[in-house]
Amino acid sequence: MEINIQFEQEVANFYQSMGITAGPGDIQYRLILLVLARNGEDRVTRFSEIREYTDKVADRGSIGSKLKAVFQLEGLAIKVGHGGYIITHKGLLAADFIKSTSDYYKKVKTVEQIIERIPA
């Protein structure tokens, strides 16, 4: 599964424009979940793998804090060794939700394009 940072940023901006700043509207949350989900429950995701995506949108310290404050405390990921994380079942459910918010965004944009082509 390829993760498109620019698309994910568009989706996050869409949700932020509706006042949803956490979860679907948080680009860091979106990217971290998608990287963890890509590797699945059976593979350790290295912090450096997450940073490959998040460094383009956030500084390193904020990502480490988010992993501790959100992902570990809420049970979305488990820390394994030094710099390793494994997504939990709960984390996979959250990742599915994030993917569904992307699908919804695509549908909204498609409808908007159709409406724009309808003569007034």
Image: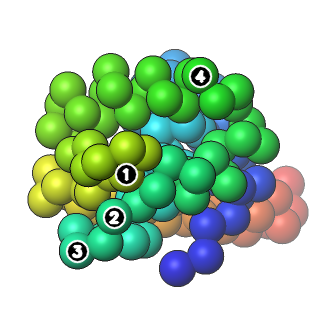
Residue carrying label 4: 61
Estimate how packed mark 1 is, as few (under 14), some (14 to 19) or many (20 or more) residues with alpha carbons within 10 Å. Answer: some
Observer-nearest residue: 69 or 102?
Answer: 69
Helix, strand or loop at disc 2? loop
Q: CA distance from mark 3 to mark 2?
A: 7 Å
Observer-nearest residue: 22 or 31?
Answer: 31
From the top left corner, tell me how far across and down residue 20 is, in percent: 47, 25
- Describe residue 40's horizontal placement relative to residue 29 as left or right: left
Q: CA distance from mark 1 to mark 2?
A: 6 Å
Residue carrying label 3: 42
Residue carrying label 1: 84
For marks 3 and 4 on the same chain, the one whose residue lies earlier in the sequence:
3
For marks 1 and 2 on the same chain, the one whose residue lies earlier in the sequence:
2
Estimate how packed mark 3 is, as few (under 14), some (14 to 19) or many (20 or more) residues with alpha carbons within 10 Å. Answer: few
Q: Image point 84% across, 67% down: which residue?
A: 117
Q: Is residue 111 visible?
A: no
* Identity of the residue furthest to the front in this view: 82
